């Protein structure tokens, strides 16, 4: 981000509707993992894929009804910011065929959303940069 974000004011918040594109992307990421389930995949990898799919779908479900008040005085994050970070990560992850690497990157996406749920704008910006590094 080239310019600093405005500070959040009382009443600024994020809702599930604000990040619907991200919610849809999380669901799509879970669906896309089906292609990794082949005859040559070990049972341990199949279990790891299943857990990742379940985690993605659970996070998407949690975000649907989300209402997060942004912390006053911290960076004012918008749904567009969250959606852009999610789209970037998915664009990279979508090309990864290695199961372990893909799961590590998905774990980073889930960690990013755990930070989003805090409403701390500065922490969310830091988490977005951490996510960018994790999927690179």
Image (spheres, helix red, strand yellow):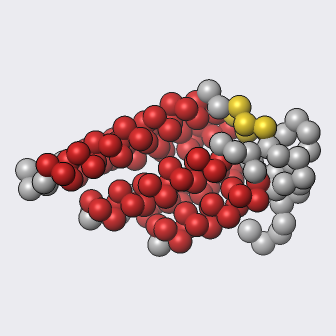
Left or right of residue 91, residue 69 in this image:
right
Q: Quadrant of the N terminus?
A: bottom right
Dividing the picture into quarters, in which one does residue 131 lie? bottom right
The residue shown at (48%, 44%) is 25
Query: Residue 89, how many percent across, how many down?
Result: 50, 60
The residue shown at (83%, 60%) is 5
**In the current view of this chain or complex, which residue is farthest to the top?**
65
Closer to the camera, 127 or 81?
A: 127
Q: Is residue 107 above or below residue 101?
A: above
Left or right of residue 99, residue 76 in this image:
right
Dividing the picture into quarters, in which one does residue 79 lie? top right
Residue 38 visible in the shown view: no
Q: Is residue 33 above or below residue 93?
A: above
Left or right of residue 28, residue 34 in this image:
left
Query: Residue 28, how many percent across, how many down?
Result: 41, 42
**In the current view of this chain or complex, which residue is farthest to the left?**
39
Query: Residue 95, how many percent across, how many down?
Result: 35, 63
The residue shown at (88%, 35%) is 11
The residue shown at (13%, 54%) is 41
Query: Residue 85, how many percent across, how many down?
Result: 59, 57
Left or right of residue 112, residue 41 in this image:
left
Dividing the picture into quarters, in which one does residue 84 lie? bottom right
> Disc count in the image?
0
Closer to the camera, 25 or 135?
A: 135
Residue 16 visible in the shown view: yes
């Amino acid at each position: 981000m080239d310019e600093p974000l405005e500070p959040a004011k009382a009443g600024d918040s994020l809702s599930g509707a604000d990040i619907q594109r991200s919610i849809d992307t999380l669901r799509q990421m879970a669906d896309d993992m089906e292609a990794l389930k082949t005859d040559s995949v070990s049972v341990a990898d199949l279990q790891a894929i299943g857990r990742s799919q379940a985690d993605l779908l659970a996070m998407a479900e949690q975000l649907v009804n989300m209402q997060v008040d942004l912390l006053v005085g911290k960076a004012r994050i918008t749904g567009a910011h969250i959606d852009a970070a999610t789209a970037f990560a998915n664009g990279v992850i979508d090309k990864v065929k290695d199961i372990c690497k893909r799961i590590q990157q998905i774990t980073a996406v889930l960690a990013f959303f755990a930070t989003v749920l805090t409403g701390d704008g500065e922490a969310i910006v830091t988490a977005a940069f951490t996510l960018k590094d994790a999927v690179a």
